[in-house]
Amino acid sequence: MTEVKEKVKRDQYQKALSAYAQALKVFHKGEYGKASEALKAFLGKHTSEIEFVDRAKIYLAICEGRLKKESIPLKTFDDYYQYGVYRLNQGEYKKALELLERARDKKPKEGKIFYLMALTYCLMKETEQCLENLKRAIQLDKYFKILAQNEENFEVVRKNKKFNLITRMA
């Protein structure tokens, strides 16, 4: 009888381990909605596996936090600019561009927007868009020429002839 109980216990443990691993696999893909569902299902079925339950609750809290919509009211140029910088620093380049474009719409002659857009396009490996925005930034403020020449993120376009022409503009 003890051997049967041990086999049942091992089977339950393996099922719990498998369900937990599957939920984490989805979590690490960044699919937080699916991971949240998988973790809830895991917690509903495998409450006796305490070593996994505590971790699953932590991952579930992370999923729910990441699924919450950000409710930052964006109205002014500075709102869009600052949040665009934040998204850029997070590596969310497309979202950063959307925000920077909104800031540009509010102040179309603000060179720092074009400079950041150039930087973002560079990080996205979209050279032409990068150079167009960099040129516009330098036309609006010569200071960006110096910044661009020293910006390590522009290293990938530094050997581009057009980059050299743009950054040497008077």
Image (spheres, rainbow, N blue to C red):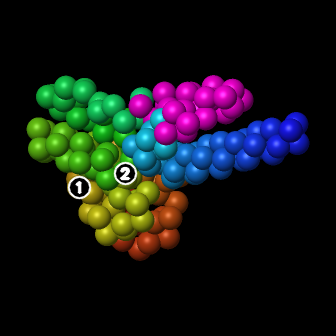
Q: Position of residue 115 (x, y in %)?
A: 32, 48
Badge number at residue 136:
1
The quadrant the C terminus occupies is bottom left
Which three-letter amino acid code belongs to the residue tagged 2? Tyr
Compared to 120, does 109 lie above or below? above
- Left or right of 50 on screen, residue 19: left
Q: Residue at x 73, y 47 (%)?
A: 11
Name of the residue lying farthest toward the bottom: 161
Name of the residue lying farthest toward the front: 1
Main SS type for the magenta part?
helix
* Disc 2 element: helix
Few, some or many residues within 10 Å of mark 1 (<14, 14–19, 20+): many
Which three-letter amino acid code belongs to the residue tagged 1? Arg
Compared to 87, does 58 lie above or below? above
Residue situated in front as seen by the camera: 143 or 17:
17
Q: Position of residue 36 (x, y in %)?
A: 45, 39
Per the rendered image, the range of residues in magenta is 41-64
Dot 1 or dot 2: first in sequence order is: 2
Residue situated in front as seen by the camera: 17 or 56:
17
Question: Distance from label 1 to label 2 (Cα)?
Answer: 20 Å
Q: Which residue is mark 2?
A: 93
